[in-house]
Amino acid sequence: MHSLAQEIQGFSKDRLKKQCTHVTTVTGKKLLERRSNEGEGQVEQVEELEGSGCGFVEDTSLDLQVGVVRPFLLLASQDAAHDIDTLRRYKVSHVLNVAHGVPNLFPDQMVYKTLQILDLPDTQITPYLEECSSFIYQAREQDGVVLVHCNAGVSRSSSIVIGYLMLKEGLPFDDAYSQVKLARPSIRPNPGFYQQLQNYTP
């Protein structure tokens, strides 16, 4: 039987896959990092962007997954909220935007409500629940379909939907959380929101 050390020694660099990574630097330069078969890295500049951001690897894939919590209540990311085909497919009539700095693209076709909430553990989320739940409830009364979204559809919007189920349907936190998680498995309210909702008594 080969030992791990022997396997590592016998491993050829030729078996490594060539890799390319797109990186955006702090100054907004777009770079392409390549690894050759010899394991050497090459970096070339692709383009320079205006403005500055942090160095990050960009994820350009769209998240168009829509979680159906109730027939009239949907949960998604800003990608879905900005995709007219997705909105039409789910017959969305109302959009509750709880992101910070995300525009509403179809004001002539949807009823929008925007609350700019910061996704920080010390942000108080529960004071928003009454207003958001009223908007969802009114849409339901008008036979509408509400899409609730933030940026990623993970923390703020999921917290609002969980709060709605607690406030308007009287569900305990654990039940509300698990129903929303079932509809959109990627949800993860930040620790502050999670704790506030756990302690929330409508």
Image: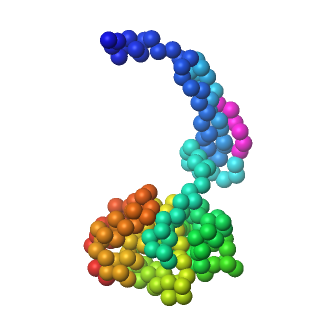
Along the viewing direction, whichever of 98 and 81 lies nearer the viewer: 81
Q: How is the image coloured?
A: rainbow
Residue 135 position (above or below residue 183): below
The quarter of the displayed image where residue 2 is located = top left
Q: Is residue 123 visible?
A: no
User: Residue 132: x percent and y percent?
Assistant: 46, 80
The quarter of the displayed image where residue 162 is located = bottom left
Residue 148 position (above or below residue 154): below
Q: What residue is drawn where x is 54% and y is 88%?
A: 142
User: Residue 12: x percent and y percent?
Assistant: 51, 14
Q: What residue is drawn where x is 60% and y is 41%?
A: 23
Along the viewing direction, whichever of 9 and 118 lies nearer the viewer: 9
Q: What residue is drawn where x is 38% and y is 83%?
A: 168
Q: What residue is drawn where x is 69% and y is 79%?
A: 108
Magenta residues, start to end: 43-48
Q: What secondary structure predominates along the stretch shown in magenta?
A: strand
User: Residue 159: x percent and y percent?
Assistant: 40, 69
Residue 167 position (above or below residue 102): below
The quarter of the displayed image where residue 36 is located = top right
Q: Is residue 44 magenta?
A: yes
User: Residue 119: x percent and y percent?
Assistant: 45, 64
User: Which corner quadrant holds the C terminus?
Assistant: bottom left
User: Which corner quadrant holds the N terminus?
Assistant: top left
Numbered circles on residues, count: 0
**Relative to residue 170, is residue 136 drawn left or right?**
right
Q: Is residue 169 magenta?
A: no
Q: Is residue 182 visible?
A: yes
Along the viewing direction, whichever of 19 and 40 lies nearer the viewer: 19
